[in-house]
Amino acid sequence: MNLDKEIQRRKTFAIISHPDAGKTTLTEKFLLFGGAIQTAGAVKQNKIRKTATSDFMEIEKQRGISVATSVMGFEYNGKRVNILDTPGHKDFAEDTYRTLTAVDSVILVIDCVKGVEEQTEKLMQVCRMRRTPVIIFINKMDREGRIPLELLDELEEKLQISVRPLTWPIGQGMNFKGVYNMYTRTLNLFEPDQTRITDNYIELQDIQSPELERWIPTSYVDQLREDVELVDGVYEPFSEEEYRTAQIAPVFFGSAINNFGIRELLETFLTIAPSPHEREAAQRMVRASEEQMSGFVFKIHANLDPNHRDRTAFFKICSGVFQRNKFYHHTRLGKKLRFANPTQFMAREKNLIEDAWPGDVIGLYDNGNLKIGDTLTEGEELQFRGIPSFSPEIFKEVINRDPFKSKQLEKGVRQLTEEGVAQLFIQHGNRRIIGTVGELQFDVIRFRLEHEYGAKCDFMPLRFYKALWITGEDQEQYEEFLKRKSSVIGLDKEDHPVFFAESEWMLNIARENYPGVTFHETSEFK
Ligand code: G4P
């Protein structure tokens, strides 16, 4: 059947990394392989530079470009590849977490000099929570980094996942000679070249073959044989099943900037990575191959054109075929909606589409009906799960600076937080607390409130450390907690009570004193 065929050929994934490990460079090389771009440098401009903290033009430009580049689709060897871009900047981590809810797998890029960095651990935590299959790419092998075995140990320890190398580097740094593909038993020799896509494969039936010495110096051959024997002995044989159930992460080595080890990565990825399969809704599991269309919104871009209050909702199709101009059921509002101009993203272009398949992400023009997490179906009352909010790390109270513009401020804050720029909590009916992952968000909010809504505000820092969603197993204790702690309790966008812990210590005390109250790290706990 057509639907099954289309599902099987789709691979929807995200490339994630600590900033500077090489995510942008790798994305670009994939697009080059896919013929989606012709020259290197095209994706680069999409990046927020580290210096951009207060450069609003940069942020605005980024928003403009990122609508077109947030999803990059291309065809490769009969497969439809959808790369969902995630902002590398740490302050946009919340956006990255949400994007991870819409992918079927992930490629994690590690810098071989730096190893596992802080941001990597956090991203991996989200993948673990969602049991997302992960492939690890160890980048920058042309630099003098840490030795491969040591890196693998660190990955296992810090990322809490078993690893299995599928390629193995021959030499490193100045002496990086190539990679040996342990999956296909082929050798790929290194020729530094940042522009061409070079292929220099040598088929080897046996790693003991004396032919090897024709290609690489004897000392490297000995080392390679020793390493491969060791790796085969130490690590379990690779199992696709274990990878797909997120128990094992295959590891590749290479150098993105030099285009090296990338084809091995891409081709193996396309062979083993999962296609869309099923997704959990509050009511039941929904299989991708079901005839009836269903999907959810995971991201919203608003007000890109200041003259129109337009919004683009990013919609991930989970089952069935999405069709232009067909009426769909908006399950939260109980409303029928149809979309005359759904768009699909092919590399840097946005195209109008007639239909889209499970795994695809399309842009829906919206005038205020759609929120992050909303589900569309053909009539069934479904609500997709797995789009939780995580605790923000910085909390500030919104102070209105222009009493004549309080309506605009309220609207702006509501819309921007709906868009997912930050989280909004309401305390005592009218105190607005904004929570973010980074300081940059406050600059973005202040700037956009002023330019898009004509409202002015200040932010007063609050000394909260974490927001935790609370529920009560013991109703009496729960109510007492809400009453006693009212100064540190607010309501989230769904009007659910949230406890603002001032420190880990205060949180532990609360846990001890109120065993009948449960403190949840994310907003999805039912
Ligand atoms: P990110 O998206 O993860 O933040 O990283 P990005 O691809 O922008 O790469 C960060 C830096 O690392 C860039 O250098 C990039 O050229 C370099 N890089 C990427 N892959 C490799 C590699 O395989 N080997 C080496 N040696 N370097 C690599 P930059 O100086 O920050 O930027 P640019 O001036 O090159 O644009």
Image (cartoon, helix red, strand yellow):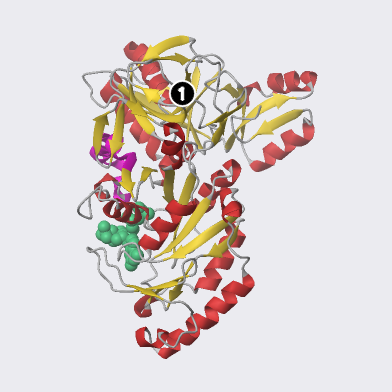
Compare residues 450 and 243 and report the one nearer the observer: 243
Task: State the image quarter where residue 523 is shown.
Answer: top right
Estimate the x, y position of residue 393 in percent, counting from the top left. Answer: 52, 39
Please say whether residue 487 is visible from this viewpoint.
yes
Report whether 334 appears left or right of 412: right
Compare residues 252 and 397 and report the one nearer the observer: 252
The quarter of the picture where the C terminus appears is top right
Estimate the x, y position of residue 233 in percent, counting from the top left. Answer: 63, 74
Q: Quadrant of ligand 1?
A: bottom left
Estimate the x, y position of residue 435 in percent, counting from the top left. Answer: 49, 32
The magenta stretch spans which residues? Answer: 50-73
**Above or below 31: residue 504:** above
Number of numbered callouts drawn: 1
**Above or below 144: residue 349:** above
Task: State the image quarter where residue 26 is shown.
Answer: bottom left
Q: Residue furthest top?
A: 335
Residue 53: say if magenta.
Answer: yes
Magenta span main SS: helix
Report whether 148 appears left or right of 23: right
Report whether 336 appears left or right of 474: left
- Going 49% across and 87% down the picture, which residue do you hit? 222
Estimate the x, y position of residue 101 in percent, counting from the top left. Answer: 50, 37
**Above or below 190: residue 357:** above
Mark 1, residues whose alpha carbon is within 10 Å: few (<14), some, or many (≥20)? many
**Disc 1 target residue:** 293
Helix, strand or loop at disc 1? Answer: loop
- Going 52% across and 68% down the picture, which residue do you hit? 151
Please say whether residue 118 is visible from this viewpoint.
no
